[in-house]
Structures are given as structure tokens and as C-alpha cells.
Amino acid sequence: MKIQFYKYQGTGNDFVILDNRNKQYDSLTKEQIEFLCDRRFGIGADGLMLLNTHPDYDFEMKYYNSDGRESSMCGNGGRCLTKFANDIGLVQTDYKFLAIDGKHEASINTDGTVALKMNDVDEVKYDHGNFVLNTGSPHFVTLINDVMHYDVFKKGREIRNSNEFKDGGINVNFVQQTEEADKIIVRTYERGVEDETFSCGTGVTASALVCSHNDNGFNRVEVKTKGGDLSVEYDKIGDAYKNIWLNGPAVKVFEGTLEI
């Protein structure tokens, strides 16, 4: 099978994207997806996405981790897929699409960045200084000092594989709060990739939610990752988080064909 692929990245979180509107890639196997994402033998990416048609939405997003398994929501992936849809001729300012965690809205800003509306979060569990919440994917968030010199791989892998999260695993975020209340630094160990990624959209969102600087009302949190800068805007109403928007760059890297 000849694959026509497109490579996109959002703050270093990179993806292989396939235009599957004609369903020609429905038969891709786990092994084939894993090969395409392999950084030595394939194209190389943190994950693979299919852009599918849907009768009620502008498109449907189907996401696979680099291990070849279908996964939960990917925030940076959703932003990149929106940019891809625009690039291939689905030219709009605002989009509505369906993902594994439900419906999403997205918009392309005048500067080319992409904003993605995440689903509301109604519960954040807190235990011994750590937070667990679901922003489309499950996330563990812990606050530390000097995050850029922390062993994210070792500690992230340890938490991800702990008995507490053995059923399905969890993504692990290490967050440093800066002297400015509305700015944080985040590093994430991602399940399915089984390594630190340069950025994780749902992880950045989870981290921004637990680092609110306004306990009631509007918040905007600027987030620095290894791959670049993102921002998260939301309304905090009691213990609930509404109108959550993840915003940042989504960039085409290259395209090509590959026989598999």
C-alpha cells in the first residue's frame, strides 16, 4: 500500500496525518501504524491521526499513539488536524469536529495559531500534593521546583507504571510555577509513547487548570514546554472548569509518500 502522509507538529509534539476521507486507510494495522511512527525506520512521530468524514461535523479525528494503539484525546493533535483540514481545502475560520472524547470546536487565528476547545472538567482529585484529572486523557500533575533539571523519564515512568494506575495507565506532568502567577513550565511523560514528549496538549491543559490564579472566574495561563509556548484560557466556577481553550502553533513540517 502506498501511503500519502503529512507531518505536522504543535510545540514539538509531532504527528503523522493521513487524509482518510475516502477510507483508504481504514485497514491500517497496529504494526503498520507503529512502523510509520518509528523515528528510525519510519517517518517518526509521537502519534498518527486519520482525518475522517462525519455527516454531522466538519470532520472526525481518529488518534493513535506511537505504539500503534488507538488512544484518548490529544490536544495538540486536535489543533494540528484542524490546521491540516484547512490546508487541504476545508477552509473555514471555525470548525466543529468529533473525537473519541466527544465534540470539539476549533478556530484558526489571524496569526496562524490554532485554538481548540476542550471538554469541561468537573472533578479534580487531590492527594498529598498531587492532582489527578481527565482533560480528554487521564493526567497526573505534581508541582516541583527546577523542572528543567528533573529526571522526568525516570519518575514519570515510575508513576505511570505504579499499581495505582495499572488499569490503563496515566500521563504524568511535572509543573513548575514561576514568580508570575499566570505562567508555568510543564514537562510530560506520555503513556503510549512511553517517554517524555516535547509537549502534550491535554497535559498542558491539566496543568494549567490546577494552577489557576483566579479562584472564581476567568483565567489565562501561559505555559512553556520544551517545544514552545502554549496558553490555556478557562472559567473556574467553584470546583468546575468551563470554556477551556488550548491555544498555540500548529505547523506543517513536510509531506511525502511511503510504501508499506
Image (tube, rainbow, N blue to C red):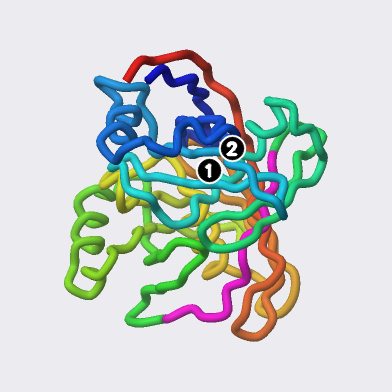
| Residue 129 x, y percent position in the rendering | 37, 77
Q: Residue at x 40, y 73 (%)?
A: 132
Dot 1 lies on which element? helix
Kind of residue indicated by mark 1:
Gly
Queried whether the magenta region covers residue 154, the answer comes back as no
Q: Residue at x 67, y 75 (%)?
A: 236
Q: Quadrant of residue 98?
A: bottom right
Queried whether the magenta region covers residue 118, the answer comes back as yes
Q: Is residue 243 left or right of residue 157?
A: right
Residue highlighted by disc 1: 77
Q: Quadrant of residue 162?
A: bottom left
Q: Observer-nearest residue: 31 or 118?
A: 31
Q: Observer-nearest residue: 180 or 9?
A: 9
Discs 1, 2 touching: Cβ within 8 Å: yes
Q: Is residue 186 above or below residue 167?
A: above
| Residue 234 x, y percent position in the rendering | 69, 65
Q: Residue at x 48, y 36 (%)?
A: 227
* Within-10-Å neighbours for mark 1: few <14, some 14–19, many 20+: many
* Within-10-Å neighbours for mark 2: few <14, some 14–19, many 20+: many
Residue highlighted by disc 2: 80
Quarter of the figure with the C terminus:
top left
Dot 2 lies on which element? helix
Q: Is residue 63 above or below residue 232?
A: above
Q: Is residue 53 left or right of residue 165?
A: right
Q: Residue at x 37, y 66 (%)?
A: 140
Q: Observer-nearest residue: 179 or 154?
A: 154
| Residue 247 x, y percent position in the rendering | 66, 47
- Distance from the alpha carbon under mark 1 to that under mark 2: 5 Å
The residue range painted magenta reads 114-125
Q: Is residue 100 left or right of residue 231?
A: left
Quarter of the figure with the N terminus:
top left
